Image: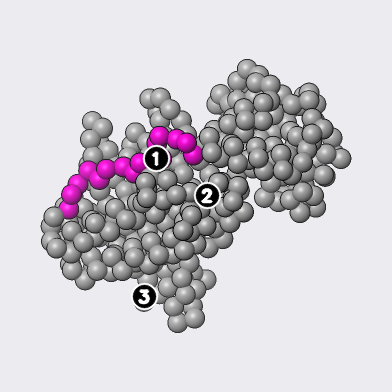
Amino acid sequence: MGITIREFQVAMETYGAERLSNCSGSRYPISVPCFNVAGTNFLHSGSYYIVQREKRVPEEIMNRAMAEFGEKHPGGDHFWWGETHSIKGILTLAAMLDGKYSKELVDELTNETYKKLLDCASIKSNVEFPFHSTHSPKMEKLYKLLAEYSNIVNPFGNNEFKFKEPIQYLDAVDVTLALQEGRKHYTRLNLSTNSSQAKFEDDENGWFYDTFVSIQRNRINGYINMGHYYVNGSDGRPVDEVVRLDYKANRDNYDEHPDDIDLRISLKTGLAWKTYKEELAELATDEQIEVMITHLKISIKKIKNKIVRNMINI
């Protein structure tokens, strides 16, 4: 678990903390927001956690805050040594420092923080595909399935979904959003559970949708890691659009298994290849495309069941 710069800023603004001048991150020398609560300055590290400056949070309050999350000592999901790693964690510390903590207040502030974060234009619609693949009927089928895949990886871009209040699903799904506007813009959305992950990223270099799901075949634990991405050239125009499959039949064994699959297919050219073997690419066969379709369907179903159904009103 971690907290992005954007999440930290919105959480502190929602809480009503005193905004200080931006300062340099404690881990990376970039400009980060800084806030004061009851004499303690909180600033972002520049990576994935918050640190304290000036007056430190008293040990008694740190212990109370950790106890609220069942953490007996630093090193858990929410608190490390001198670090805070979550929205709920920083809101809990702030409320305790101000002497107004209650679980109901933190839940209310957490819900409002996530509602503000997720009311974001860059995740409200899924991106358009630059290349409409018409190389074969099978490729057309794959292309159409990728539209469904994108609406599951980034469910906030699917207008048909009616979402619950964030506080109703945050215990089941970890939601992380990083956002930067301007010339070097980026959007990074990550939804995860203990067995599944869905990621959407979009920046000036391109975009990608990515999923990781655990599966079991013949009582052996494996995984499917799929991706759909495109990249821009130096002129800012799309160079290629690719769908990628990495299937590992036995996740506990690093040796290659006969059933492992490493496959990439270009929607622009119709060519297929293994990772780092693009120079050996050949026209994708119907069998290869069907393998991609099969694993896409499994991934879509898993992400729907493990992540999205926790987030929407069915």
Q: Between tags 1 and 3, which lies in front? A: 1
Q: Residues within 10 Å of mark 1 (few under 14, many from 20)?
A: some
| Label placed on residue 259 | 3
Report the side of 224 relative to 230 (left or right).
Answer: right
Query: Which residue is label 1 attached to?
Result: 124
- At a point 60% along the width and 41% down the height, the residue shown is 111
Under mark 1, the amino acid is Lys
Measured from the top left, where is residue 239 in percent x and y?
22, 42
- State how far apart marks 3 and 2 are (Cα): 40 Å
Assign a secondary structure to mark 3. Answer: loop
Give the answer, above or below, for where 229 lies relative to 193: above
Q: Is residue 140 magenta?
A: no
Task: Looking at the picture, tell me which residue is in the foreground, 134 or 244.
Answer: 134
- Read off the magenta span: 118-133
Task: Looking at the picture, tell me which residue is in the foreground, 168 or 214.
Answer: 168
Which mark is first along the chain, 3 or 1?
1
- Residue placed furthest toward the top: 21
Query: Which residue is label 2 attached to?
Result: 164
Measured from the top left, where is residue 197 in percent x and y?
48, 56
The chief SS type of the magenta part is: loop
How many marks can you see? 3
Which mark is first along the chain, 2 or 3?
2
Q: Residues within 10 Å of mark 3 (few under 14, many from 20)?
A: few
Q: Quadrant of residue 206 in the image? A: top left
Under mark 2, the amino acid is Lys
Under mark 3, the amino acid is Asp
Badge 3 vs badge 2, beta-carbon distance below 8 Å = no
